[in-house]
Structures are given as structure tokens and as C-alpha cells.
Image (spheres, grey):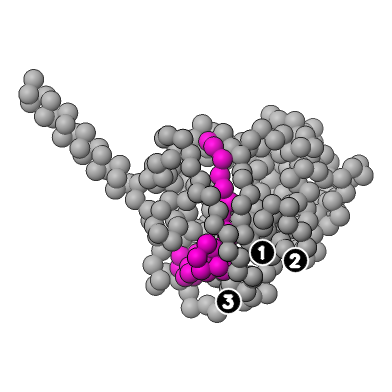
Amino acid sequence: MRKLLAIVVILGLVGLVAVWFLSAPRTFAAADLPDHAPDLANGEYLFWAGGCASCHAAPGASGDDRLKLAGGLVLKSDFGDFHVPNISPDPATGIGGWTTLDFVNAMKLGVGRDGEHLYPAFPYTSYQRMTFEDIIDLKGYLDTLPAVSNAVEETALAFPFNIRRGLGLWKLLYVDGKAFVPDAAADAAVNRGAYLTEGPGHCTQCHSPRNFFGGIVAERAYSGAPLAGGNGSAPNITPDKDSGIGSWSVSDIVGMMKTGFLPDFDVVGGDMAEVQKNLARLTAEDQEAMAAFLRTLPPISSQYTATKAGGDMM
């Protein structure tokens, strides 16, 4: 009996060590980054493509105040409430003291400046597909925005979600830090659209159902999903003719991005109205590229009915 107990204890300790090792934050080193001077114009473009102001501007901000990224928005979810941080260049309450490497590790690996795992309410599972150069450009642009002193309340989830170390195991399934790989069988426009949609645009984050662990169900990506906090549902944007956008042409999709009007002359609403404002800032070529990419997706019948509260597109 003593030997059996000893074996159980040893195996338990080995398991704990293995979990601790596997859950450790992984980060890039400075040597992994390219020698790249920030292109501020591209950084600004990616800022809007990624919808940064939509989450990080103070709630209710409009006009130029949307460039004051003081944070403070509360995102409701099944796991708890997430407090969106200040990402202005303020050195005390924002990311003014962050290096480019700190920012890259947050964007591509979900690791904060102090080495802590970041909650994936911050969509780094999509941002990881961005190139190092684009992320460096984005950081350069963020550094030019107004510094705002605003200490945002720390996100405090209930047990066991408050144990951030556990995210290291979750990341083994969903985070590899690899940039988007173009499809050799697709043309340049479709690949550009795929990059924008799956990387900075992070469209899968709202339009895809999630499993028990909160990870995106890859085989049903873009087919619609209930929005976090019970605020309606995001629509199916695959080319399914019954429940998706299969009847939409590329020009229909581009028209929605530019104006917010749908093919039936309705308008986008809810969360999608905010997204559309960002999409309208993209070039016509990039809007067409994103539309072309969406048309290449496999049609999937939706399990959800989109609602205006959830950003109806149909």
C-alpha cells in the first residue's frame, strides 16, 4: 500500500510539473523580429482594418475622441466580464512603456508585458496571422495617438477562469503565432482578402460558433454564432444560399462595406454597424478582395438566426 501511495504521489508531482511546463507563456525574442522601420500610414490603415477604436476608445466616444484609446468598455461573456484596457501611449496606465517586442508578443501570442497570459477576449487568435511588419507598423501608429491617463479596472473572473496559467494549455490548441500562409491555388486578391479577414479583421471571432472550451469550431467558421453576453446572433457569412450570403454578389458585399446598405435596401445594425464604419475606410481593392475571399468559403447552413441586436447583415 505504501508503494502504491508513493507511486501515486510521484505521478501526481510529475503531472503537475508537466502542466506547469506546458502552460508556461511562450514569447518571441528580439532576434525574431525583422529590421523594419514602422510605416505609419500602413499602421493607421491597419488600425481601422482591425477595429481598434471600436473596443479601446472610451464608451460613447465619437469623432476625434475615438483616437483616445482610454479603454473602459466592458465585454460581457459566458466566462465573465472583460474590462477592455487602455492602449493609449500613456506610460502609467496605457502601453506607452511597452516595447515593440512586448506588443508583438501580445498580438501574436497573447502574452502581456509582464509575462502573463492575456485572455482571448483580446482576439490574438486572429491577430497572430498578421505579419511582424504589419504589427510593427500598427505599434508605430498607436504611439502617435494621444496619451490618456485612465486606469481601467482589472478583469476578475470566477474560478477556475481567474487562473491565467491555465490559458497556456488552451493556447496549445489555438495559438501558434504563425503568420497567414497564402493559398498557392488562389489568386493574389483572394489571398489579400483572406489575410485581412482572418488576421486584422478578425471576422471569425464573432461569425463562428465556439466549443465548450471557448475555441472557434473551425469546420463551421463564418457560419454565424450567438454573440457573447446574449446580445443576439452574428449572421452566417458563408455563400450558403438559404441562410448565408450565397445570393450576394461581390458588388453587394462591397456595397455593404462602403455604405451599410444591404441588397434588400435594409441597413446593418447592432455591432455590425460599428464594424461597417471601419470597413468603409478600406480601399475599394481591399473591400473587393475581402468579398472575393468570402465567396470562396464553403457554404454552410446556419444554426443561428441573426438579429438586429447582433448585427444583422441579411
The answer to which of 295 and 5 lies nearer the viewer is: 5
Q: Which mark is in front, 1 or 3?
A: 1
Find residue 271 and report its image quarter.
top right
Label 3 neighbour load within 10 Å: few <14, some 14-19, many 20+: some
Magenta region includes residue 100? yes
Q: Which residue is mark 2?
A: 64
Crowd rating for badge 2 (residues with CA inside 10 Å; few <14, some 14–19, many 20+): few
Q: Position of residue 200 (x, y in %)?
A: 63, 58
Q: Could you tell me the amino acid type at mark 2?
A: Asp
* Residue 58 seen in the figure: yes
Q: Which residues are magenta?
A: 79-103
Q: Main secondary structure of the magenta part?
A: loop
Name the amino acid, label 3: Pro
What's the distance in space between the residues labelled 1 and 2, CA to CA? 8 Å
Question: How far is the residue under mark 1 from the one under mark 3?
Answer: 20 Å
Disc 3 versus disc 2: nearer the observer: 2
